């Protein structure tokens, strides 16, 4: 299950982060297709990929949080 959190690295820009783990049984092309689908349909971009010693891919995705400003 993806985990989502928020943090602001600098003033004025807010990012939403999602962490996704992929099993070692999934091939590189399958993982790529899943990430491309998230990027195209969810607006996510790749922030970090870590491959652990047991072969699990820990992927961190991010997207900007756009706040609507009310105009008077």
Image (spheres, grey):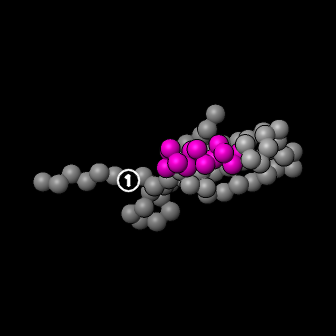
Coordinates of residue 22 in the picture (x, y in percent): 73, 41
Give me the residue at 66% from left, 45% from top: 33
Coordinates of residue 27 in the picture (x, y in percent): 79, 44
Q: Nearer the viewer, residue 12 or 41?
A: 41
Is residue 35 located in the magenta-colored stretch of the structure?
yes
Q: Nearer the viewer, residue 7 or 50?
A: 50
- Which residue is label 1 attached to? 66
Give neighbour class at mark 1: few <14, some 14-19, many 20+ (Cα, 10 Å): few
In terms of image quadrants, where is residue 24? top right
Coordinates of residue 52 in the picture (x, y in percent): 82, 50
Please identify the dominant SS of the magenta region.
helix
Q: Is residue 25 above or below residue 59?
A: above
Q: Which residues are magenta?
A: 31-43
Give me the residue at 60% from left, 40% from top: 3
Q: Nearer the viewer, residue 52 or 32?
A: 32
Coordinates of residue 29 in the picture (x, y in percent): 74, 47
Return the residue found at the far top: 1
Give me the residue at 25% from left, 54% from top: 69
């Amino acid at each position: 299950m993806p985990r989502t959190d928020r943090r602001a690295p600098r003033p004025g820009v807010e990012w939403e982060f999602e962490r996704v783990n992929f099993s070692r049984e999934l091939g590189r092309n399958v993982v790529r297709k899943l990430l491309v689908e998230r990027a195209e349909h969810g607006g996510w971009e790749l922030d970090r990929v870590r491959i652990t010693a047991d072969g699990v891919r820990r992927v961190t995705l991010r997207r900007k949080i756009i706040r609507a400003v009310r105009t008077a």
